Amino acid sequence: MTWRVHVRILPRAGLLDPQGQAVEHALAALRFPEASNVHVGKAIALDVAAESAADAAARVRTMCDRLLANPVTEDFEIAVEGDSR
Amino acid sequence: MRVAVVRFPGSNCEPEACRAVERAGGAAFYVWHRERSLQGADGVLLPGGFSYGDYLRSGAIAGFSPIMESIRQHADAGGPVLGICNGFQILCEAGLLPGALVRNAALKYLSRPVDVRVERTDTPFTNAYHPGELIRIPIGHGDGRYVAPEAMLDQLEQERRVVLRYAGPANADYPPNPNGSLRDIAAVCNPVGNVVGMMPHPERLADPALGSDAGHRVFVSLLATGSLSPGG
């Protein structure tokens, strides 16, 4: 089976995120004072051939550890489409 | 001494790196990143630039280039390896150096001379400087802010693994630490000291014809230690 997997990568919590701060300031300048705690990251979508959604998620977690995310600076979350767990 | 300058798609200043080695009395040659052999090199330089367009993260994809396995073996055997700018980013991504380099705190690409203090002079790339010496060499980077977990930074300090620190004059109209690097770190080394990564570009200022050759002694240092390295 092929699973559509989405990886959401954000700057590691607690690490200075100058991009997030710049966007937050711009939102404030546009009169969106209700916006706070803004962070800018990246999203990666990929198809993964695997027996189950859990297997697909496990493989993508390994991909994140090896390449897709940097453990020093980034946190990541994995979501598999159609996985109702 | 024979020095391999590794080229990736998007490398820059690699001719300057070769020239700087030659001015210091060594021989330099290019090795393409798809190759697997360092062709018997005694030392390795990873130049600056934007390998793979900085896709994903600076240095992330180059860190898995075929040549990296030979570089790892060379480093493990005690051979000297210097990563400059993008080369530093690649060494961090490849796990040969700790920490990571992220977007400059002010979000701007910086291309300017900076003052750095030589904190450690017993590496193959700094032994021709005096301890505590201030040198002014250029930077050119968007992702130069050195970060690592606090515990790792403490360990780096304890093990004297900070090789260069940003140390601009306090009264200048420009921040002494241009990119927001934690603990003002501009260069670090591995536990043994034979692998060094630095954000400044010494090869860009290694010829007196340019008005200064403040970076020249990085390469003099390498040539001085060449005969001591296991590979040479």
Image: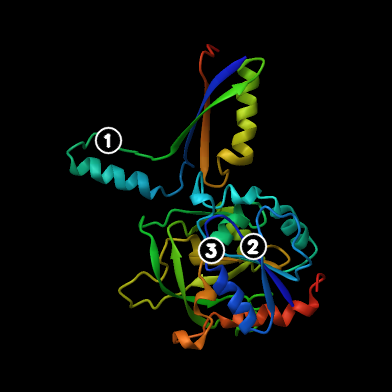
Q: Which residue is mark 3?
A: B48
Q: Position of residue B56 (x, y in %)?
A: 51, 44
**Residue B116 in picture, x, y percent from top left:** 49, 75
| Residue under label 1 | A35
Amino acid type for the residue under numbered disc 3: Gly
SS at circle 2: strand
Q: How many marks?
A: 3
> Which circle marks residue B193 in the picture?
none
Identity of the residue furthest to the right in this view: B230
Say if B6 sits above or below A33 in the image.
below
Q: Who's the residue at 52% across and 68% down the image?
A: B13
Number of other residues with Cα within 10 Å of mark 2, as a class: few under 14, some 14 to 19, many 20 or more: many
Of badges 1 and 2, the one in the foreground is 2
Left or right of B185 in this view: A63:
right
Residue visible at 58% across and 54% down?
B99
Residue at 76 percent of width and 58 percent of height: B37
Name the mark on residue B6. Answer: 2
Q: CA distance from mark 1 to mark 2?
A: 46 Å
Q: Position of residue A46 (x, y in %)?
A: 53, 27
Q: Amino acid at mark 1?
A: Ala
Q: Are marks 1 and 3 in contact (CB under 8 Å)?
A: no
Question: What's the CA distance linking mark 3 and mark 2?
Answer: 10 Å
Taking B141 as reference, is A46 left or right? right
The image shows residue A74, relative to residue A44, as above or below, that is: below
Q: How is the image coloured?
A: rainbow
Pick the front one: B12 or B81: B12
Q: Dot 3 lies on which element?
A: strand
